[in-house]
Image: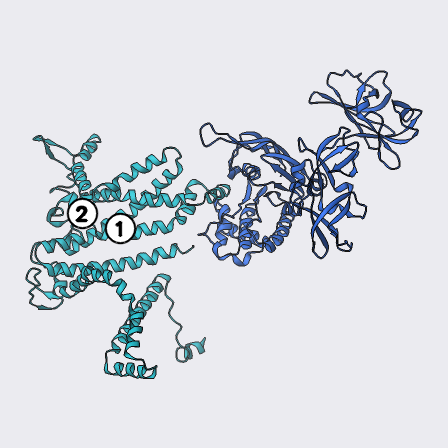
Amino acid sequence: MEENNGNAGAIAKAPPKKHNRFAQYFINLGARIKGWFVDMYGAIKDFFYGFTKAGRAEKKARKAEGPQLSRRERLRRGLKTQSGWLFVLPALALMAVFTFYPIIASFVNSFKQGYSGMTGKFNGWGADNFVRVLKGDTGTGGASFTQCLVNTMLLTFISVPLSTLLALLISVALNSIKRIQKAYQTILFLPYLTNALAMGAVFATFFKIIGTSNNTETVGLVNIVLGWFGIKPIDWVGLTSPHWQLGSLSIPWAKYIVTIIYEVWSGLPFKILILFSAMQSINKQYYDAAKVDGASRWTTLWKITAPMIMPQISYLLVTGIMGGMKQYSAIIGLFGTTMGQDYDMGTMVGYLYNYIELGQTGYAYAGSLLLFIIIMIITFFNNKITKKRTTYR
Amino acid sequence: MRISIQHLTKIFPSRTRGGKAVHAVEDMNIEIPSGGLVGLLGPSGCGKSTTLFMLSGLESPSSGRILFDDQDVTTLAAEKRGVGLVFQNYALYPHMTVQQNIRFPLDNMRIKKEEGNARALDAARLVQIEDLMARKPNELSGGQQQRVAIARALVKMPNVLLLDEPLSNLDARLRLQTREEIKRIQRTTGITTVFVTHDQEEAMSICDTMVVMKLGVVQQVGAPQDIYDDPNNLFVANFLGTPPINIFKGKIAGGKVYIGEEAIADAPWETPFDDQEVFVGIRPEGFIYSENGALTLNVDHIEVMGRDKSVVSTHESSTKPIVRSIIDSDILLPAMSQLKFNIKPNKLFLFSAATEERVQYPVNVFKGRIEGGKVYIGEEAVAETALEDREVYVGIGPDGLMYNENGAFTLQVSGVAEEEGKKVVAAAHENSEKPGVQCFLDGSAELPAETETLKFNIKSNKLSLYDAETKERLSNGRE
């Protein structure tokens, strides 16, 4: 013991500190992300090395070592190896115009202060756009970035898992019925064929507190039903809709409920389609085996069916979350182009449109870049989590 | 656990309207003793798997009963029967490790984790996969997967172990090994085991009782060797044995068996007297080469297989393209286009051309003699004949006796039973060659009760005579 106290610290290296699994995961993750950046830096460095003086000299030397070829032969070989580019050229040209240029332009333009989309004039370079977007100090009375971000996150992370779970349960039910299965399938798929704006408008009517029809005041369908249970009409989608206030942040919970119901309902058909067909392809013998092994229906669902269709479930979660990050049309359909009262139901994409409309393109650029980063981070974790559960094949 | 299958029937209704319903299993009756290893054998679609699934409870029978010991389990749910089932393609859950797979039935029984793990390990040890517990099924070979499936079936200590084509997904070498393994596991655990296979070799090598099925109907039940040596019908004879039995078109005429124009053997004692068209089945090992052999085959080629050689030949009466005969490799065969063979009597089977049933008759055989134009059994003169005096065997068909108070022939009666409108008399006679004498009487025949002896007259067309020394059939002048 004494020895340990006296010398251990001095001679032996202190054993690496043991973190709990969670912390360890993030430490490893950090190291790996650092690794990517190092690799990327190396690749970029190598690429540009070819353009430096030393790089050019090295290239020349390498060429001199190789067999000397005639100009004609070099051309022939060059055509042979590089002709592949010709084939991808049309697609490449289109992508350059509609994909690469916008990405680069929005990246560049987001750093232009006071950029005007119409004239292309700007005051100078800097991160001013980002600062103002994040601070909410845009001075135009447009949507608040924080509000939009919180809305998008909350709506997505509630509605996507909820609709996936519901789709799973409905698919199981659909899978277990034998008669008129096809009819049910068709009915369940119908909402998929309906336009989002139209659905939103119909939903808005359902949830209205007071509307006018033939100059008479009417109450929305949902409030009529609630009335049967003695619940006073709630203004679900209108100007007096109830909300909680957290500092400058508004949580319009009634509108959230409407939006989530809408999202779940409109998201179900596709999810059911995917999950149901996945279930149909599961070998019946697994269910027979589970039956002989004494598994209950509940156990069979969670221990057999769900893991077997995990690839499809994770696909739906990933695409659903990505789609949720980009949601816009549903909000417009439900709450109009003002996205609720003072943009309190604004989403990230709504934010971008809003500032384009206001002519403040610089903020829209900055917002889109932030949205891009956020989606990247979420997708990264999405892949991490779902990959872990789908690698049994 | 004893399994008793009584009148088990499974009918699958037709999928199309007005179509024919499929009788997958028809009126099956089998008793499986506790600790037995039973193989259900038959070609595809013979209802063997359906039977297995009915035993497991995954399919419910259309009619009939299944008893485990004395408990009627016909309508009992699968999970309550306590059966372990190994599927043809194992049905291991791909997302679970080996250990989780094996423990799955225990988890469903809400057994504590430590106990569950211990029992899973025991089961894994039994099938020797305890090193693979952390793997996923797709990281295992076919044989290993199969062991996991068996361990999963055994871990809940089932009363009955059911295996559906357990070896069909394994390669040839592994199959041999796994065969032994299944036998060993069954012997160690003593669990009543039923398995399904379409491979007769597999069935013969593993099981103690074999059930041969065809189109839902049980053809024969018995020990594998007994069924091989004594098939009930053409199907069973054909189905068992590699290489398969040779089948010829032939006939019984005048107490001889003919293939084409050649009389290849005497009709066995067990055959009835009526001349008829038959299928003649000869096992490949039933040929003896002889220069003066009875059956001539056109040799195509000879395959040498080390231990023995296989003569591949043709015959115009054969129902198969080739006739295969297996000869000991020590026997030298002349290089000729035609070879003659004698047939071993116990490798020769006769099947009725009409019904394909085995032509076999429980003929009663007695020692007797001919004296002065009369046939004597013991001291009783039972029939008349034109033959000369000599010692003979007297064959009497079971339906050849008529009860008569003043009959010529006396039997010691041990019992009378009613069966399908017939009276079956079990009796004995001191001159009988067989331990018992059996005869069928018309159901309306009135027999005196409580007697020890009965007298009979003999129908002349059901009586046949054989020379006592040569056992050759004698014409008794009835033709």
Q: Does residue B261 show up?
A: yes
Say left or right for A7 vs B470: left
Q: Amino acid at mark 1?
A: Phe
- Please state the horizontal and vertical placement of residue B45, each as a whole percent of the image: 55, 38
Picture layout, residue B96 above or below residue B191: below
Picture layout, residue A235 above or below residue A160: above
**Neighbour tally class for label 2: few under 14, some 14-19, many 20 plus, Cα within 10 Å:** some
Q: Amino acid at mark 2?
A: Ser
Image quarter (top left, top right, bottom left or bottom right) of the C terminus of chain A: bottom left
Image quarter (top left, top right, bottom left or bottom right) of the N terminus of chain A: bottom left
Question: Circle 2 is placed at which residue position?
Answer: A329
- Please state the horizontal and vertical placement of residue A195, each as a whole percent of the image: 20, 42
Q: Chain of mark 2?
A: A
Task: Give the colour in which the image draws chain B.
Answer: blue
Q: Quadrant of residue A46?
A: bottom left
Q: CA distance from mark 2 to mark 1?
A: 18 Å
> B48 or A53, which lies in front?
A53
Q: Residue at left 64%, top 52%?
A: B180
**Neighbour tally class for label 1: few under 14, some 14-19, many 20 plus, Cα within 10 Å:** some
Question: Circle 1 is placed at which residue position?
Answer: A157
Q: Does residue B136 show up?
A: no
Q: Chain of mark 1?
A: A
- Please state the horizontal and vertical placement of residue A31, each as a whole percent of the image: 33, 69
Q: Which mark is residue B400?
A: none
Say left or right for B133 vs B448: left
What is the number of callouts on the image?
2
Of all chains in the rendering, the one displayed in cyan is: A
